[in-house]
Image (cartoon, grey):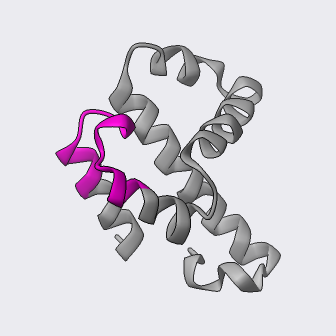
Amino acid sequence: MGVRGNQFYDLYNRYSSIEDIPADIKANLEKNIFRKSLDAVWQDTREFFSQDKPEQLRRAVGNDKHKMALIFRWYLGNSSKWAIDGIEERRIDYQI
């Protein structure tokens, strides 16, 4: 598992929800990893899963751990896409 995957795994095990993650760690996630707000990532995640697998969104309602997992999946899913598309500013995030 890569460095980012390990970070997500640790956060997933330590906290019950995205909201429970301390503000300084959330700020770091938004600035350095996601490069957008967690609210924006969740919006993107909802749009994707509403088309692809709506049952995932239904499962996330009332299940904060699952919501957190879907947010982390946004990053992991996009890291492959960034590599395929050759998005240079996301080079450090590439998952091949």
> Which residue is at a point 64% across and 67% down the rendered structure image?
80
Q: Is residue 96 magenta?
A: no
1, 29: nearer the viewer: 29
Q: Is residue 60 above or below residue 90?
A: above
96, 41: nearer the viewer: 41
> Which residue is at a point 51% across and 43% down the rendered structure image?
71
Single out the residue that lies furthest toward the front. 23
Single out the residue that lies furthest toward the right. 85
Q: Is residue 96 visible?
A: no
> Which residue is at a point 56% across and 74% down the rendered structure image?
95
Q: Position of residue 16 (x, y in %)?
A: 25, 33
Q: Where, quadrant-wise, is the C terminus in this rendering?
A: bottom right
Q: Position of residue 27 (x, y in %)?
A: 45, 59
Q: Where, quadrant-wise, is the N terminus in this rendering?
A: bottom left
Single out the residue that lies furthest toward the left. 14
Q: Which residues are magenta?
A: 10-26
Q: Position of residue 73 (x, y in %)?
A: 52, 48
Asked which quadrant contains residue 58, the reply is top right
> Which residue is at a point 71% across and 83% down the rendered structure image?
89
**Total numbered labels placed on residues in the image:** 0
61, 32: nearer the viewer: 32
Q: Is residue 4 above or below residue 13?
A: below
Q: Is residue 64 left or right of residue 12?
A: right
Asked which quadrant contains residue 7, the reply is bottom left
Q: Is residue 5 visible?
A: yes
Q: Is residue 17 magenta?
A: yes
Q: Of helix, strand and loop, which mostly describes the magenta segment?
A: helix
Q: Is residue 64 above or below residue 33?
A: above
